[in-house]
Amino acid sequence: MVLGTVLLYLLVYRKRERRLVAGFSSMPTRVNKLLRISYHELHRATSGFSPENLIGSGHFGAVYKGTLEKHGNKLVAVKVLDLQKNGASKSFKAESKTLRNIRHRNLVSIVSYCSSIDSKGDEFKALVYGFLENGNLDLWLHPAETADQATSLRSLNLLQKLNIAIDVASALQYLHDHCEAEIVHCDLKPSNILLDNDLVAHVGDFGLARLLPKPNDRSSEQGTSSSIAVKGSIGYAAPEYGLGHAASTPGDVYSYGILLLEMITKRRPTDDMFMDELDIHNYVNRALHEQVSEIVDPLLLSEGRDENSRITHGEETINGGREIDCIISLLKIGLMCSAKLPNDRMHMNEVVRKLHLIKDVLLGVRVHQENLQV
């Protein structure tokens, strides 16, 4: 009898464990699993932080590609903080603390962090991530702006963009609802979304991230200015941040909405055409019902069509007639997420649910158009 009880317990435990692995887990990454890497190792891995290995820059530092020889020639991205910039040290603490305690397939994975002294005797701080082969989403959305010929030929079809939208929404859903404390990213934009070899999206750059206090401790913050300045990025930052309001999950939802509109229209929110009262939200809203084809990235409407008006993506064949319905539904989600008032925005749980419905319809898994109502 005792043996049977033990076996039953083990069976239940194993099932629960498999569910955690199959989905996502909010169990923290153990600090002792991070590689121990010195300044000299990072210096060697990046060839002395050479310009040839520079792959990007952010608010508080530069990112270099590197190879860790002592760890099986592991490819990494090394974010070196510019400690001369105000807030860089605080950003290092925020990002290292956040990434140590979260784990999700659509978030960047931290390999190590280094707080040391460089060869000149100056303070040195760096974060080390796993290297993702396909760079950031910005390079894919706006390839014509790069001087790299190989990069300038990149493009994403509708299904790929939808998958990326689902990946990013899933990451935000995890940060907002499935961590011990709600985490607000505060700087969601295409350049902070990295793509791996399979074009799976990973949200990165948590230098401005905020861990929100428990609901009981938030009453004093509601509708008031934040004691911590939230910079974000022009065009993506929620309008209430400009009024000094505290960081919030609806703020991330706003950034996500702008990102989704950019992905479908292929226009940056900072495009020169947007001025005075016209922004990307109003631009899409005005054209939504009668002029959608004029504002959508042309590649989404034409790529891969054959004489039967069908679109082929790998092994999946998509009926061209469903494209425009799915595109309109995505634009509607983008508009609802980027509503001016925080309380009018969608919750990320609902966003994820709607996006999966749209994908099902796009692939023909669901045939009823009413499933696309947003």
Image (cartoon, rainbow, N blue to C red):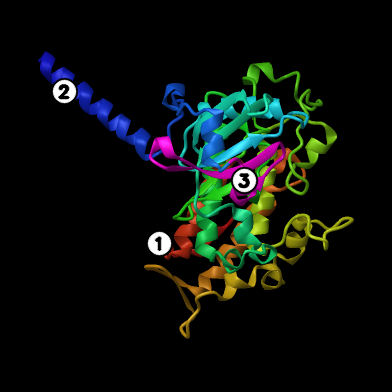
Magenta-drawn stretch contains 61: yes
Nearer to us: label 2 or label 1: 2
Instruction: Please identify the quarter of the rendering in which residue 187 is found.
Output: top right
Q: State the separation of the CA atoms marked 3 and 1.
A: 49 Å
Q: Residue at x 78, y 29 (%)?
A: 86
Give the residues drawn in magenta, as a range: 48-75
Badge 2 amino acid: Leu
Q: Residue furthest top?
A: 2
Label 3 SS: loop
Q: Residue furthest bottom?
A: 307
Other residues around mark 1 within 10 Å, as few (<14) / some (14–19) / many (≥20):
few
Other residues around mark 3 within 10 Å, as few (<14) / some (14–19) / many (≥20):
few
What residue did someone put label 1 on? 365
What residue did someone put label 2 on? 7
Q: Quadrant of the C terminus?
A: bottom right
Q: Are marks 3 and 1 in contact (CB under 8 Å)?
A: no
Badge 1 amino acid: Val
